Structure formats: C-alpha cells, structure tokens
Image (cartoon, rainbow, N blue to C red):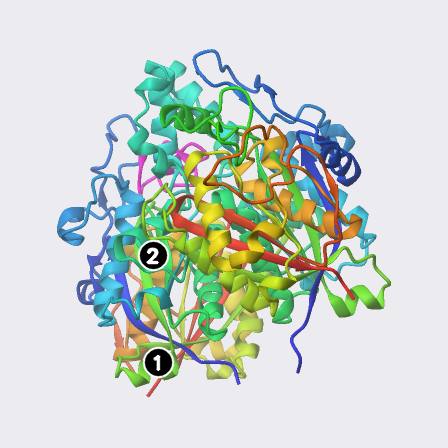
Amino acid sequence: MSKRVVITGLGIVSPVGIGREAFWSNLTNGRTGIKPITLFDTSELACKTAGEITEFDAPAALPGMKTGALNRTAQLVCAAAKLGLDDARIELDAATKPRIGVMIGNTLGSMHTASEFDRSALKGGFVAASPMDFANTIAITTAGYISVLFGVSAFNSVISSGELSSLNAIEYGASFVRSGHADMVLAGGVEAVSMETFLINYLPKFLSGSTPGQREFCAPFGNGRNGFVLGEAGAVVVLEDYDHAIGRGATIYAEVRSFGTAFDKQAFYSSSPHSIALSKAMTSAIKRSGLSPDDIDHVSACANSSIVIDQSEATAIRNVFGAQTDQLHISAIKSMTGEPFSASAGVQVCAASMALHEGVIPPTINCDDRDPNCDVPLFSESREIKIKTAIVSTISTSGLAGALVLGAVS
Amino acid sequence: MPERRVVITGIGVVSAIGIGKNAFWQGLIAGKSGISDVDAFDTSEFPCRRGGQVRDFVPSQHLSADAIDRLAPVAQFAVAAAKMAVEDSRLNGNMEPERTSVAMGTTNGEASVIEKICSVWVQEGYEQIDPKLLKQYPMHLIPAHVAMEFGAEGPVVMMPNACSAGNWAIGFGSNLIRSDEADVVLAGGCETLARGAFIGFNRSFAMAPEMCQPFDKNRKGLMPGEGAAVLVLESLDQAQRRGAHIYAEVAGFGVSCDTYHITGPDPTGRGAVDATISALKTSGLKPEDIDYVSAHGTGTKPNDRVETLATKKVFGDLAKRIPMSSIKSMIGHSFGAASAIEAAACALIIENGMIPPTINYREPDPECDLDYVANEAREHKVDALLSNAYAFGGNCAVLALRAMR
C-alpha cells in the first residue's frame, strides 16, 4: 500500500503577503499585490506595474543566516522554506535533517545574475565579474541554498517546466515520500522579478500594456484583457508522510491526491486557444484519485489575463466538468498576484490548501466585465463554504498542462 | 504487482570525440582527446582557454532547415541526440504519444542565447534585443522541442541540476516507467560551451590551462566541455515484446546532498557516500557486485580527493580492486550533459566488456590511490556499475546500471 502524502506546512512569500496568515487574509479580502515596480527603473518602459514583493527583507526573514551571497531568487525561496518549516513546526535536528529533501520548481532563477555576470565581464573584462555571484548564475543553487542554510540533506533538485514547474516539483517530491526515501520534502517553486525576467515577457509583448495605446491591467477571464502582469513569489509547501504527520501531531492542511499532465505540440506558443492538454491533464488527475468530475468542489485557476491562456482554461474546464461547471467554486488568484511563472502553481497550491482547511474560497478580482468566450462562473467576494476536494489547474505557453487534485483531511 | 523494470534500448551522443554512438565509443576506447583551443566565443582575455568543443556537429545532418531556424544551439544538440537514440532503438513510429515522455538535464539551458542578449544590451541597449532570442531562452523549451519532434504527450521536464543533471533526468524518467506513467522516456542532458563558465571558473582558479588530469597528483582543474546524450528508457516488458536490443538495465538511482558549501564538496564526502549507498540500496546491489565506477572525476583538487575518499568509505578494501575512470579526461566537463554522456558510456561499457581510460594520468596522488584505468582502455567484464555525479548546491546523484539477463 503506497504511502499517503499530506501538506503540513505552507511557506509563502508573495506580493499579497509574506507568511501564510498575511497571504490568506489579503487573498480572501481581495487585496491586490500588483503595484508600481521598484526593483528597476521603468521610466522608459510602457509597463510599470508588477506583482512585486515590496516589503521583503532577507536578513529579517532569515535571521542568523548569511544571506548576502544569495540573489533575490534564492532569498525568496529560502525565506519561503523557512516559513514552511516553521509553519509545520519541524524541529531541525540530527534525526530529522537527513530525512528532509528539497524539490524546487524554477525556470528563470539564474537569468538575472547570469546576465549581470556576463554584462559586467563584457564591460570591464572577466575580472570585473564577481566570483561571489558565480554560484547564483547556476540554476541548481536555488535548491542548494536551502540545503546549505537549513542543513537538510535527503536530496536537493530543481525541476523546470515553466508555469507547471511547482506542480512537477510537488509530484516528484511526493514520490520520494511515497518510496520512503524521505519523511518530508520542501517542494514548491520560485521566480523573482528582475529587468531580465521582465524583458523576456515585455519585448515579445506578452505583458499587459506592452503595446502602445493599451491600458495596463490584470483581469483574468476579463473583457478586453490584453496580456498578463508579471509577478514573483516563493512558495514552498512541506510534503509529509501521513503517518509521520499524525505521529507528531502535525496540522494537516490537505492531502496530495493525484497529478495529471499532458503536452500538446500544437499549443507551443500558439496564438489561438488550446484546451486539449489541460482537459487531458485534469481528466487524468481526477481519474487517478478515484474521483469523478462531480466530486470536485474548487478549481484554483491559472488564468492570468492572457488572451489565449484564459480562454484555453475556460474551455478546458467546460470540457471536463460539463454542466457541473456552474456548481464549481473557481478562483483566479493571479488577479491579485500577477504571474509568478514557475512559482505560480506553488502559490495556487498554498491557496487551495487553505481553502480546503479553512472552508473559505478566495475571490477573483476585476472580474465584473467578463469575456463571453470565458464561460466559467466567478465571484468577486470570498465565499465561506466547507469543501472536500480542489484541483489546481495549470497551462504553460510551451504547450504543457498539469493538474493536481488536493483533498481535505478531517 | 511487481515493480516494472527499466532498460536502455537506444543511445544518441553528441560529443567532442565523436557524433553518434559508434564514433563516441571508438574515441573513448582509443583514449582520444577532444580538448582544443576554444573558439566558440572570444577567449582571448582568459588565462585558461581550452575546452572540449564539439567540432564536427553538422546540424543539417540531423535537423530540418525549419528546426535549424527555430532551435537555439542547446536544443539542436538535444534534438539531434534524441533522433540518434530513437533511430538506434528502432522505435520510430512505435511510440504511443500519451505513454512517451521527455526528461532532459542542463545547467541553465541556452547559454549562447543569454550571451547574445547581453552583447546587444551592452553595445546597443536592451531595446534592441530581438524578441525571438528572448523567446528561445527558457530552458523548459528544450525538452518541449524534443517532445514535439517525436509527438510525446506525457510528462515533459527539464532538470537543471548542472553537473548531475543527466543522472537526475534518467532517475526521473526511470521513475515514470516504474510507476507505470510511461512506457518510453527520452532521457538525457545537453549543454553548450558557455562564456559564463569560462568567466566563473577562470575567476575561481578551478580551470585547467592545458588538459584535464583527473586523479593525477598535478591536476590543475576542470576543462569545460559541451555535448548531449539521450538514452531511450523503456519498460522491460515492452522492450522484450518488440524484441528490442537491450544495452543495460537501469537498476537504481541514489540521491543525497551535502550541506557544507554552495559550490565546494563536503571534505568528508558525506553526500557522495549517502548517494552511493542509496544507489546500491535502490538497485539491490551489494558493494561486491560492482565491477566498475564511472567517476565524476572533474580534475579539480577537491572533487577527486573527496570522490576517492567517499568510494573508499563505501567499498572499504574492495575499493582498490574496482576500476574507476573519468571520461572527462577526454571530453572535458560538459556540465548538464556530463552524466548523461557518462551513462551512455556506461551502457556501452556493459555491452562491450571494455573500460575507457582516464587519460593524461602521469603521477599518482597519495590521496587518490585507486585504480583509475590509467591511459589505456582495458578489457573487463562489467555486470554492474555505478556512475557518480555531483553538482553545485551539494547535489549528489549516483546511477546504477546492470547487464540484462
């Protein structure tokens, strides 16, 4: 009999709040984290807002630890890991540390430092590049810093699949708990706002307001939306063997039930909507958990105000849930966080775990004026309702899609 | 239900000593050096400027004109290696889309793309950066390109675990087959020579000026390299049903990590020891079953000393009797591709009963006192082996392969 994997800690550093409580309070009150960018100069740019984490202070978030050598990506993910460990009330000692692994979803974490490193060398010769920064130019150190700072040593790894990264990290991380290689895994994702991660979306005109004459706004499933708003986050959940969690009297937020994923090559950077991969991923995830679509109460949507992604997701939800769609409680929390890319599904998993645990479902903001092509029910004020099962839905512009079913544990 | 077994049924390699399985293997057993003065970018300012540059890769021999236009260099290596592997497996046309997956490894993906972006940024301003270049950069697009080429519709991931990435991709892929998520996984690693690596390793004095000399007393550092390898991983059931040629079985995958330092190994070899023990445990192999160890063997002082120590800690008195060589002496350290290329070599070692040497080995180091198969290939029957890979972040991943029977 395979081990059950549950979520016993939620570590979140996000534009709508740092720490589980602030995050949840702001999310359920519909407070946006999208604000003017301060991390770089936007005076010459058409887009000026992002889901930026403005109140983040690395030395305060990681007391007693050497954070100076870490770039922003590493700082955000380590702070999220610490919040997750604290929330799960895990004592780090000689017995627990070798039994805790690290699996982090990330795609662009090294881009900013790698670019700065190279640009310094181009301007001032290779001696101008700081050897201190070298580690930060290598993607694996995003997970490596968690092992080094907290001494957890079952394994560390990064996994990259764009917007799906955190779901792949949680699923693969959970496999190490199921096989008994680890008791707990710090799993999730991270992505930081930087000039580089901004440009990669701004110059190809993926961002809202990047085409002259467009208004800059974030309205998932909304009428007249014209692109997404960039975000950033570190979201790390503590995955734990159910018996281990019960044994130590841990708070269980949710159970990781099952994962489904699919790739559709027709959808690779497609400019037209594509619902096949997500439909397959959701159907497969629901089937593997032994449930039917009628059993799903809540969908944490990936809709981010992009024309193609939102319509694809709305269509996939209709495909999978049919008439039941109108009974679903659907939230598009990127209306408040922006798009934190590889961290996005990790943030959704945190929100969906809280929804299951607290019996409150966060709203979608800016959804009053709806795109008729996105025919899914939304609500603009949070709902109090006890639910049993949630699904986290994700589509990547690369043609990948994924879905994770989470269940309440009573 | 017994756990599904995983076998290797196809090999594709792009390396500095040869393109394709056969040229690569001939180079390995001949002890051929693929090291030369690097001219992939301007190296004039660097004190150390040699590396394992791939020189005879002709994209048009592997890729369509359209693919050459769309794909950046690392993706070209990856797709070419995958095509060679699938051709070698004779699977082409017989891969069920939903049961086929892709897992690749890399350091950061398209290094030359970020370097072009930076050059334009510095010389002309960021406004002039070509959006097409930016759209090629995200590293998860590399396995997506491989998936598109073969119509794979199952899980598609990149494992950017740098110097141990290839082993992680193979470990991830094997797990998919064992847990019945897939029947075929194209798993491997890919990397191109990066200016960033030259800057970083020259700045940290970890790069060798002339040649890579793993385990030699006078070793001076690593030698950057590039390349790609893709293995066709397949469920044993399916491979037997279709009468496939089986190179070896993926017996186990062991992981752990150091918590000592973000770039340097734990001097006690703790993570390496634990990963090795875990590889033995997951494969059901005992230390005395191991006939060969494919060393991480980068040629840096700390790596080779710690790897030797860790091997002795696990194998005790047996350690000196187990041949352990580093093919990085021939092709350099191809980082995100390295352990995938080494896994390809390992499958061929089991197939051919021959061990490639550690070349450039001249003077024994008292701290590195194992059998490194110095300078000459050796005939040796190998039924089971381990392949070591360690990376920044203290990451340690060890693959166990065994002969199929």
- In this rendering, the answer to whether B221 lies above or below B342 is above
Residue at the top extreme, as displayed: B44
B133 or B163: nearer the viewer: B163
- In this rendering, the answer to whether B295 lies above or below A277 is above
Q: Look at the image and say whether residue A204 sits in the magenta stretch.
A: yes
Element marked by disc 1: helix
Which residue is located at x 82 percent, y 67 percent? B240
Which residue is located at x 47 percent, y 24 percent? B195
By secondary structure, the bulk of the magenta-drawn segment is best described as loop
Is A325 on the left-hand or right-hand side of A320? left
Label 2 amino acid? Lys
Do the residues marked 1 and 2 share a common chain?
A: yes
The segment highlighted magenta reads A193-217
Q: Which residue is mark 2?
A: A334
Label 2: how many Cα within 10 Å (few below 14, some 14–19, many 20+): many
B164 or A95: nearer the viewer: A95
Q: Which residue is mark 1?
A: A244
Which residue is located at x 60 percent, y 41 percent? B372
Is B331 on the left-hand or right-hand side of A56? right
Residue at the bottom extreme, as displayed: A410
Q: CA distance from mark 1 to mark 2?
A: 33 Å
